[in-house]
Each structure stands twice: as structure tokens, then as C-alpha cells.
Amino acid sequence: SHPPTEKTASAAASASGGAAANLALVSPFFLWGTSMVAMKGVLPVTSPMFVASVRLIPSGLILVAWALSKGRPMPKTATAWGAVAAFAVVDAAMFQGFLAEGLQRTSAGLGSVIIDSQPLTVAILASIFFGETLGVEGVAGLALGVLGLLLLELPEDALKSVVNSDGADALSALRLEGSLWDSGEWWMLLAAQSMAVGTVMVRWVCKYVDPVMATGWHMALGGVPLLAYSLATEPELYSHLSLSGADVASLLYASVFGGAVAYGAFFYFATKGSLTKLSSLTFLTPMFAAALGYLTLDETLSATQLGGAAVTLVGIYFVNTRAKEASAE
């Protein structure tokens, strides 16, 4: 038997390793949330398509260069490049393009609720394609996560109307009007589904391509049509582009940390464990964004929003606990 000191040291090392693993797992969502705040300051002097392409292309190339430096293999076969191209279309071009269109048309609160509710779609797809199970606790956790997002991000007027069962007032508070294709909420819903499908696709893609290479190339290639669209439709933006040092720093942060590091970590983890468990952590993204906005942009957090954050954390706990139990069975 081991001496007590060895057992204690082993337990401490195991605990610190577990804590480090959990921090790594949460890191993409922290980086995405804080990147949202960084990008928010740049949008008034640029455009959503410009920011999306600048975020994707450099960070994708950074990941490819890093993977090459580590001796990771490039995609070699037509099948491998086809998988990367399909991944690029769905998870980069479609997701970021729909997101950019949605950002221009929707209130930030409802848009964020829709985009961050994509773990529901991931849970359904992971159940169909990979046999992941959630059970009653997991389903309840997902529902709590969405409820928490609603409390965290919807305008108070809309929430009061929902509580009072006044649907018309709730819709007017959310400013839903015009045709479907004029609706920011519709574009956000399309973006959420694109990200969900991309999350599930990554396991198929990584049968043919190294995970880091797949992530890097799909971002670099997926950003090209967005940049082309921006150049074709916003030529005046480039002729009058004037970025301050803070703007450049924000774009660098969104690209290097919110892009290369966050997406590299996310899709690495997506090839390893439960997709539903990983995707449920997406609920953390707006919480990190709200916290940083509160600290740096003088944004306020109401009691309802703090309650929403608490409900969301309980939901994530349920999903992750159930995912661990299911994987242990």
C-alpha cells in the first residue's frame, strides 16, 4: 500500500488535473463571450461581414501553421478536402454569414437566446447519430438552460408580457415585424442550426482529417466567401476604413483568442467526449459576455438577469451530470 503522503499527493494531483481539464473545457465559451464584447466595439466602424471574415481567415491560417509546426498531417485525399469544404460551408460560411445578417436585424437579447439555444439541436442530432442519451435530468437541464437564457437576455417588458400571458405585447416588445427574411430572429435560428450541424459534423470530418487541421482549414476557407461578399457589397467600407489601436486590438483578440484558440479547443473536445455535454456549455457564452460587459462597458445586470444566470448554471449541472452517468453506464 502507498504511504499516506503519496496518496494525498496523488489525490491532489488528480484534483488539480481535473480542475485544469474543466477550465480547458470551459475556455472556448469564455473566449467567445469576451470576444462578443470586443467585436461589439468594432462593429460601428466596420460591418458584420468584415468582422466575420477578419475573425475567420487569419485565425484559421494561424491554426494551420501551428498544426504544421507540430507535424500534424495536411488533408491529402479528395475525400478529406471534400469533408473540410463541407465543414467550411456549414460551420464557417453559413454560421458566420447568417449570424452577421441576424446581428443587423435583431435585438441583441433575443438573438443571443436563439443562437445559444443550439445545444437543443445538438442533443437531438447526437442522440440520432451517436446514440447519446440524456434521460429526464438531462432534458430538464437543457430546458433550464434555455429558460435561464430567456431571463438573462430578453427585455424586461417582453418577460412581463409573457408572465401576464399577453403574447401580442411580448411580440411588440421584441419588435418582430416584416417578412420572414427581414426577421433577425429567423437568421439567428438558421445560424444556430448551422453551428449545431457543424458540431455534429466534426466527428465525421475527423475520420478523414486531423482535428486541428480540419478546424483551421474550415475557418480559413469558410471566411473567403464572406470576405468576397463584403468586398463586393461594401466597397466604401474599405476606401474609408479607419481603425484605432483599440479597434485593431479588439479584432486581434476576436481572431486569435475568440477564433484560433477557442475553435481549436472546442472542436478538439468535440472529437473526444459527449457532444451534448460540451454543447450545453454554450449556455455560458452569454453569461461571460454579460459579466465582461458589466465590468468594462458599464452595462447593468438586473436581479432577473442574475436569476437567469443561476438557473442556467443549474441547467448545465444537470446536463453534465447526466452525460457523465450515461457515459459510465
Image (tube, rainbow, N blue to C red):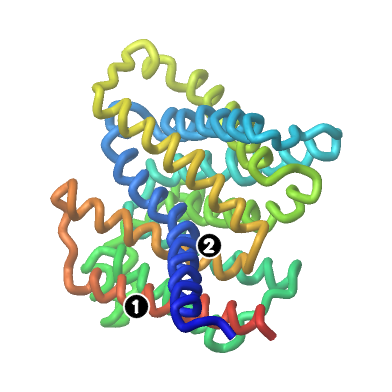
Residues packed near mark 2 inside 10 Å, few (<14), some (14 to 19) or many (20 plus): many
Q: Can residue 316 be seen here?
A: no
Q: Quadrant of residue 287?
A: bottom left
Residue 116: image quadrant is bottom left
From the viewer's side, name the closer residue of 36 and 11: 11
In the image, taking residue 20 as reference, residue 267 lies left or right, namely right
Is 270 placed above or below 86 here?
Answer: below
Single out the residue that lies furthest toward the bottom.
136
Q: Where residue 118 is drawn, which disc sits there?
A: 2
- Name the spot of residue 11 as percent of width and height, x first: 48, 76
Circle 2: residue type: Gln
Q: Residues within 10 Å of mark 1 (few under 14, many from 20)?
A: many
C-alpha span from label 1 to label 2: 17 Å
Kindly state the secondary structure of the residue where label 2 is placed.
loop
Residue 112 circle label: none
Residue at 52% across, 25% down: 227
Q: Which label number is shown at residue 311?
A: 1
Residue 26 shown left or right of residue 94 in the figure: left
Image point 27% across, 72% down: which residue?
Answer: 159
Badge 1 amino acid: Val
Q: Is residue 273 above or below residue 186?
A: below
Q: Residue furthest top?
A: 239
233 is higher (above) or lower (below) than 38: above
Q: What residue appears at the point 48 percent right and 24 percent down from the top-left corner?
A: 230
| Residue 56, percent from left and from top | 52, 34
Left of 256 or right of it: where is 291? Answer: left
